[in-house]
Amino acid sequence: MEQYTQTLALLKANLKRDWFKIIGWLVVLAGVFVAVAAKFDSIYGTPKQIAAIGSTLRSKAMVALVGNVPSGHLTTALIFASEMAVFWGLFIIIFNYTLAVGASRGQEESGLTEMILGGHPVGRLAPILAAALELLIANVGFVLITGFGTLIADMPGSDVNGTWLAAVAIAAVGWAFGMISLIFSQLVADSHNVAMYNYAFLGIAYLIRMVTDVSNPKYTWISPLGWLEKTQIYRHNNWFPVLLLIALGVVAFLIAIILEAVQDL
């Protein structure tokens, strides 16, 4: 456990450095999400409005863009989940990328990691664990704000289980991609290249989701981004994809830990 010495001290330092960035992102991401949920009933509250947007969302172009809309009777909450899940998944992934790069490769580039490791009794793996914990705290904040906020919005067709599933699933996909970003941070030399790898991976995941949604939705399971759709929020409220995202994040973090442990100082 000596390799993780002073992890909490580093986490505290990271949060002190990034608190403004985290609050800013959460205000925008969670605040807009809740605001849209609160207004959605006035936008798509009547059967005629729901039928019109439902037919639009089921076109191939919109399926490619936001994913498949559940078959059968649609409600305001179902329309909201169908439109928002993938888009907000992309935004929360970008948020996690920003934090992950800054707390890992960006910190090493600035010389802070070497200064800390060289001048204080800090464990070798403490910085990467502190980065992972920072991402976890930020995403839990997103879950709490969006979960309680969407409950208060009380959209027609919504339920408590689906509301919390939406918040947790979106945060989980962001956190999982953030953990994958920590892997790239151990593989390349600078934060610019880490960002390139991050967005290349995200682009591939989105492209796979887009193609499989249009051609054969059962293959959307290939893409981690497609797992958001498989939760079927407000229809079947399937928590299994969330478990897969958490498992993906844990595995990615373990790989990042192994890479950090074996690379040269």
Image (cartoon, rainbow, N blue to C red):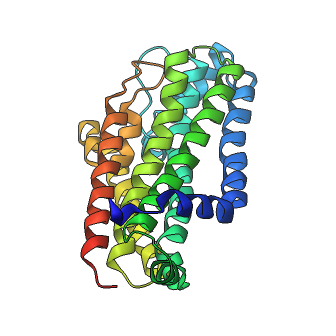
Q: Is residue 208 visible?
A: yes
Q: Nearer the viewer, residue 181 or 3?
A: 3
Quarter of the view holding residue 167? top right
Residue at screen point 55% across, 16% down: 160
Residue at screen point 30% across, 57% down: 252
- Tell me residue 153's x, y (percent): 71, 22
Residue at screen point 53% across, 85% down: 111
Q: Nearer the viewer, residue 126 or 79?
A: 126
- Tell me residue 83's x, y (percent): 55, 36
Asked if 12 appears above or below 74 in the picture, the reply is: below
Q: The N terminus lies in which quarter of the figure? A: bottom left
Q: The C terminus lies in which quarter of the figure? A: bottom left
Q: Is residue 87 visible?
A: no
- Tell me residue 121's x, y (percent): 45, 73
- How many dots with numbers? 0
Residue at screen point 45% across, 36% down: 169
Does 220 sit left or right of 108 as displayed? left
Asked if 193 appears above or below 223 in the picture, the reply is: below
Quarter of the view holding residue 154? top right
Q: Nearer the viewer, residue 4 or 205?
A: 4
Asked if 73 appears above or below 1 in the picture, the reply is: above
- Tell me residue 173's x, y (percent): 43, 46
